[in-house]
Image (cartoon, coloured by chain):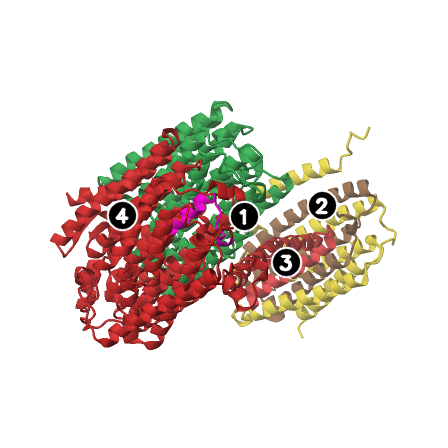
Chain colours: A green, B red, C yellow, D brown
Amino acid sequence: MNVSLILILLLVGAFATYISGDKVASKVALFFGLSALGCSLVLLNHFNSGENISFLCQWINQPNVSFALKADGLSIAMLLLTTALTPIIIYTSFGTEYKNAKAFYSLILFMSFAMVGTFLAADGLLYYIFWELALIPIYFIALIWGNGDAEERKKAVVKFFIYTLAGSLFMLIAFIYLYQQAGSFLIEDLYKLNLSATEQLWIFLAFFLAYAIKIPIIPFHTWQANVYQKAPAVGTMLLSGIMLKMGLYSIIRWQLPITPLAAKEYMYIFVSLGVAGVIYGSIVALRQKDLKKLLAYSSLAHVGLIAAGTYTLTIDGLRGAVLQMIAHGFVVVGLFFISEIIFRRYETRTISEMGGIRTQSPKFASMFLLLVLASVALPTTFNFVGEFTVLYSLSQINVWFAFLGGTTIILGAYYMLKMYQQVMLGETNTKVFADVTFKEGFALVLIIGVLFFFGMYPKPITDLITPSLEEILKVINRV
Amino acid sequence: MNTNLALLLLLAPFIGFLFNIFFGKSIGKTASGVIGTLMIVVSFIVTLYFFGAITAKPEGIHISLFDWIQISNFKVDFGFQFDQLSVLWLLFVTGIGSLIHMYSISYMHDDENMHKYFAYLNLFIFFMITLVIGSNLLVLFIGWEGVGLCSYLLIGFWHKNQEFNDAAKKAFIMNRIGDLGLLIGIFIIGSLFSTLDYATLKTAIAGATDLNMYWISAAAFALFIGACGKSAQIPLYTWLPDAMAGPTPVSALIHAATMVTAGIFMITRLNYLFDLAPDVQNIIAIVGAVTSLVAATIALVQTDIKKVLAYSTVSQLGLMFLALGLGAYEVAVFHVITHAFFKACLFLGSGSVIHALHGEQDMRKMGGLKKVMTITFVTFLISSLAISGIPPFSGFFSKDEILMVAFEHNKILWFIASLASLMTAFYMFRLLYLTFFKEFRGTAEQKSHLHESPTLITFPLIVLAILATLGGLISLPTNSWLNEYLAPLFTKVATEEHHFGTSEYMLMLVAVIGGLVGIGIAYSKYIKQNLVPEEDEKITGFAKVLYNKYYVDEIYDSLFVKSINGLSKFFRDNVETTLSSLVFGLGKVTNEIGFQGKKLQSGSIGFYLFAFVLGICAIITYLFLAQ
Amino acid sequence: MSTILIIFCVLAAVTVLTAFLTIFSRNPIHSALYLVICFFSIAGHYLLLNSQFLAVVHIIVYSGAIMILFLFTIMLMNLNKENEVHKPRITRLGAIVSFCLICLVLLAVFINSKPIVGEYISTGEDYQSIKVLGKVLLNEYMVPFEFASILLLVAMIGTVLLSKKEKTEK
Amino acid sequence: MNNILNEIGIENYIFLSVILFCIGVFGVLYRRNAIIVFMSIEIMLNAVNLLFVAFSTYHQDAQGQIFVFFSMAVAAAEVAVGLAILVSIFRNLGSIDINNLKNLKG
């Protein structure tokens, strides 16, 4: 039993969903999403018992490309994040009718497939293929099922597509160069390379461009808010919940170990960029009129912090970043789902048109508040564990980084509570707001449950990822 | 056994919270209130057990539940530590908490969301207990943020009113500014000592030979910022008066007796750290003294009964910080305890008044309640005497000790503190006279409804008044039980035995006279001259500045809130669009290049041939001549 | 100056001159005729180089077949009028500049890689009689030779197809 | 005449064929009449052929001449097809001015 099973399962799921027809497509997709989750849990079990669940076979002889899927703790953690969020995301869409549902759900599963592939791939070219493959479904999801004016949507989505694609091409160049040096795309061989400082810098920058656009790190974030706003809720969740984690994961897996010299030399610059993203994102989020845009900027702030954590090159930074990635994935999916729930009832995402919802729907208000609190990293939520660890690592570099990055807990509280106040509180709204349905509530409770459980007891995840992160850190510190 | 009991202590309020959240509405208001109260009483009883256990075992009890967060150079476990300090705090948190819960059953009975109120209150107690019994700084931080959250929830309890929501938000954010300081302090301590555990930290500091004083001072200062946020010191005090938007029992519990003392708790907890940073201690002392004076001056002219009490709280907290800064931790703790008694009593008394007047909080519309609300009046009087530092009430002892310590260290600080306590006596009695004496100034309709509050409200008042009277006994100047009890906590030998000479008695006398003078001025103004504070518009001169709280809110607003919002607008409208157009600009450049390049493809064969020939020339030159 | 060199110089002068005239003549017929002379002079060069067979083939193919083809085409199109519009001055200037440029470049290249003439020693071996050429062509270059015939066949078919009038003009 | 190159020198042939080639290039660029352009191409081809033969003699190797044969075959085919194309262009457009041929415009 090895990890390729999940890839096959998701791919088969995507086809099966497409064949099954519009009526049952959502259920079929959910079934396959859940079975992928089950499968990854089984794999986790196998992994914990010390079994080798990696997969390796030669794919193309010339150039030397292997179909290599490596499963270490880090990959499995990201795999679990993806396979756990996919069914949740599919489940959240049950309240909304989508045209041509079979294609829609099929694309979701296909995207999940590509993202899982990205997290598992241990061969540069294979990884690159999965990386680009993930872009295609989200492009169609956002373009076809998105909301708002079709022309504007097209503009935003195409910008996103070309922008990320252009960034990735630099990564491809870097891989080609690395291949010339190493004669193989296998990650172990790339780790072994001894590149000069200049080479490393260029490769580092090429990788950085790809990742900075994907994550996004300022100033490469301009696609984000618009696409989040235009994409359908499911698309936004996929994008923010999982896809941007691809970039962060890749920093840890590919960029840092391959170019450690450059990473060390220019650490301050990149940590500063991340921290600047925290402040900038938070401040811009303050004055957003659109709920989804606000959440987009809050996401920008959070991933900025995560990126800063990864670039510290300390075990705390990496571990905190991974923890925060997982936590942020859940929280952001929950928050976008909240905005979708409001949209289902009020047909609007403009914050000023909301207000006074809490009196009408106490359950919804409580869940929303819990998610807001998780987002501002209240202790006992998973986000706190991540954020604390990341901030601690920043303080190890320089206390001022921790201070500046830490402004997120002030500014984050400011914009989130302001938003909560404007959306939920105040005089009872004249428009009726039905409280959450069972399905909606169930999805939210699941997310909240995960956040609080791991907030109190993050040990399983920490134990899972730490050995592999230490391994990577060893590679980084080889020079 | 201890573990289970500790869990019971901690989880009883949490269960109350869950129960009230999920079933509170269906079981009815009284039942949800009773359950909420009972849970706190359970915690109180368990606390009594621990009090006994600690008395028998002075070195404290450590309980570790599980590993929580792992950091490279240390692990943070989720553990508890019971020692003299935490038990002391637990006692009054759960004790006063129970009383206030009881009080709330009656006070909040008209509110439709009473079950939520009790849920939040229980949650608050849960977090407060976490804060107090945590065995390391991070568990303290859970409680620290948690109480901030509950404070947010309870200040904004009437969430239909956006002003209340603003106040709640402000409280949360200002607290978070402090929290950042605390976090940074935690980071520094973590990297310096590789532990966040109090006990380990203490031994590490005691055993260390070459400490990095610079970073220790930095850590102490950062922690102090955290304390400032939670305990409403300059410059982060403005949230506390606004927090009075919440229900009055909440103000009594959270914003007077318990949560705001968390900063003092934390500094006392880490006394061994602060002892190493005398500069920071000086800052603490000065900030405390200045806060106490500034808040007292503002309180002089306020007309909202709760605002007066709020500023008085800030002022008293300032005195406690003064004591902390001077290294007299046990004195600060002593004042925390007595202050909890009399300030809770005052707030609850004011709540009783407000309850009777159906929500009226303006003192100018009160008066003459003495006859109707006897119990409230008597308890209020006792507490006012206590806060004014009149013997033999508890406040006298604690305040006097602070003044004495201040006098020993620095005469200026002593003078400021004395001035503040003089003012305290004045504004408290101004409050008392305006509220309870003379004729009723409200509407006739209100007058017809005036009544003494029910037993559920008066009982806590009586208990607290008794405590406010007798609380001083725990630390008499000559024979201090408290100091002995707390002694194991402190590395420094507790302040050298006071050999009570004439100077000490003189000081005491001065303090008492000061208090009496304050009361006297209030008496002459509001009883003899029968003055009533003027309407808002008529206030002029310095009084206006005071009435508007030195315009600090406005200054903060324009300095921070406006600027950050302006920055946000600038970023949103300018920077974002510029960045966006830069990216689009790249696209446009590509487009333009393509467009221009298209012109080359003119279709003219002659032109192609030229290009061809030139190209060949170039290639040949490169291949054969360039080398 | 030996006779051979004189002959060479004369031939070369004729070649270059007629080539120029080919290009500068207004009338295409004249151009074609000059080109014929040019080809003859090149055949003369071949003779000078002692490759008689090639010279003969050259005359047959170029001066005979190709030039006749040209002439027929010109006459077919009735192009013997001097109706050509002058190219714009810039084009002519460009053409001259390119001419100079490519001249310069090519000459530079050849001068750079000039072989050492002194090494030329005639071995007297027969390498260009019809017999030898035939052997080489039909042994070593058998396959290309056949391909050349296929090429010619294809060209023939193509030409026929291209010049056939399309029927779909109704 | 076996020692012809001793007297003339290979350089002269090189110069000659370079000049001839350049004249061809010049013709291609200079003229708009497609027929003349074709002729210029023939001149270029011949310039190359000449060089082949000269070097064939220089190396005393028949291969150069063989190549000339092939290039002649190709030239013949090219001219045949090219002229056929010209004829059909002329039929359609009524002129063989290459400036009229702008279908390649992008």
Residue of label 3: D48
What amino acid does circle 2 point to?
Answer: Gly
What's the CA distance linking mark 1 and mark 2? 59 Å
- What SS does tag 1 mark? helix
Residue of label 2: D82
Task: Choose between B252 and A22: the one closer to the eye.
Answer: B252
Question: Circle 4: is it few (<14), some (14-19), or many (20+) Cα within 10 Å?
Answer: some
Say whether marks 3 and 2 touch (CB < 8 Å).
no
Task: Please state if C9 lies on the left or on the right of C110 as rendered.
Answer: right
Q: Position of residue A424 (x, y in %)?
A: 50, 41
Q: Quadrant of the C terminus of chain C?
A: top right
Who comes first in sequence, dot 3 or dot 2? 3
- What SS does tag 3 mark? helix
What's the CA distance linking mark 3 and mark 1? 64 Å
What amino acid does circle 4 point to?
Answer: Gly
What's the CA distance linking mark 4 and mark 2? 108 Å
Residue B150 visible, this angle: no
Q: Is residue A423 above or below residue A210?
A: above
- What SS does tag 4 mark? helix
- The majority secondary structure of the magenta stretch comes to helix
Residue A150 visible, this angle: yes
Residue of label 4: B95
- What SS does tag 2 mark? helix
Say whether marks 3 and 1 touch (CB < 8 Å).
no
Residue of label 1: A225
Q: Chain of mark 2?
A: D
> Do tags 3 and 4 sit on the same chain?
no
Q: Quadrant of the N terminus of chain C?
A: bottom right
